[in-house]
Image (cartoon, rainbow, N blue to C red):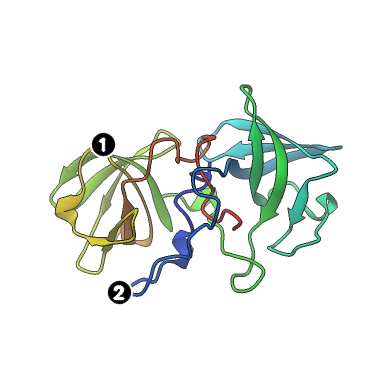
């Protein structure tokens, strides 16, 4: 998922200026499991999601599940509705069913909530996937939904590795997993920042990594 937790919060990265990267996910790295997607149905204590890769996930709510609707602690399941984009922290089973410890939806940013990325914005406001080809300043990215998209970097694109160190386009290799935010210019997505070297299993829909805005 959300790689459902990407890559920690892309929205928290400064566009330019060499500022620090996003806050670290204290105590969560290598431990968090979660998924990310859009609610398609809510029935009793069960939520159905359409995840970034187009698959269906089932989320089970228990008496211990915590909710953060729009980033607000103390929320309830009834605050969520079909169409909401949510992240789920919890434990997965083989049939893509999750027992939720926490369910949250996008917040307004700032205290109590962080911006989350909408799957519908893939390739428009952010990019995520594996580098399949590099041709000058153009990179072909295979996204989690199976689409291969050509993006283009420019002089304003900032590159960072997973240690948050500045790198260059020459450091990007075919086969590496990348994620970044940006915008479409002249019909082509241009990343403002591109994170390079996401670990395997940290892509959206998988159980191995945190969503872009995993709780601390």
Is 202 drawn above or below residue 151 in the view shown? above
Left or right: 47, with 93 as reference point: right
Instruction: Find residue 47 and report its horizontal and vertical position in percent.
Output: 75, 38
Label 1 element class: loop
Label 2 element class: loop
Instruction: Find residue 22 and report its horizontal and vertical position in percent.
Output: 45, 65
Q: Quadrant of residue 54?
A: top right
Q: Earlier in the sequence, mark 1 or mark 2?
A: 2
Label 1 environment density (alpha carbons within 10 Å; few <14, some 14–19, many ≥20): some
Instruction: Find residue 127 and report its horizontal and vertical position in percent.
Output: 39, 51
Residue 188 in view (yes/no): no
Please, which residue is most extreme toward the bottom here?
Answer: 17
Q: Nearer the viewer, residue 159 or 40?
A: 159
Q: Quadrant of residue 17?
A: bottom left
- Work out how far the residue at label 1 is from the one at label 2, CA to CA, in angstroms: 27 Å
Label 2 environment density (alpha carbons within 10 Å; few <14, some 14–19, many ≥20): few
Is 98 drawn above or below residue 167 in the view shown? above
Q: Are marks 1 and 2 in contact (CB under 8 Å)?
A: no
Residue tagged 2:
18
Residue tagged 1:
175
Q: Quadrant of residue 69?
A: bottom right
Q: Residue at x 62, y 28 (%)?
A: 96
Q: Nearer the viewer, residue 25 or 180?
A: 25
């Amino acid at each position: 998922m959300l790689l459902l937790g990407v890559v920690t919060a892309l929205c928290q990265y400064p566009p330019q200026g060499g500022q620090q990267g996003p806050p670290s996910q204290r105590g969560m790295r290598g431990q968090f499991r979660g998924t990310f997607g859009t609610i398609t149905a809510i029935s009793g204590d069960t939520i159905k999601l359409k995840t970034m890769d187009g698959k269906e996930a089932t989320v089970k709510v228990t008496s211990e599940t915590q909710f953060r609707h729009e980033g607000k602690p103390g929320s309830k399941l009834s605050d969520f509705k079909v169409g909401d984009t949510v992240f789920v922290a919890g434990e997965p089973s083989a049939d893509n069913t999750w027992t939720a410890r926490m369910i949250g939806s996008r917040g307004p940013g700032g205290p109590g909530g962080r911006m989350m990325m909408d799957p519908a914005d893939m390739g428009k406001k952010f990019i995520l996937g594996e580098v399949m080809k590099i041709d000058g300043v153009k990179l072909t990215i295979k996204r989690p939904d199976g689409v291969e998209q050509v993006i283009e970097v420019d002089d304003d694109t900032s590159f960072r590795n997973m240690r948050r160190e500045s790198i260059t386009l020459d450091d990007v290799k075919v086969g590496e997993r990348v994620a970044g935010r940006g915008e479409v210019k002249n019909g082509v997505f241009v990343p403002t920042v591109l994170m390079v070297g996401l670990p395997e299993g940290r892509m959206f829909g998988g159980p191995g990594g945190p969503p872009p805005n995993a709780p601390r």
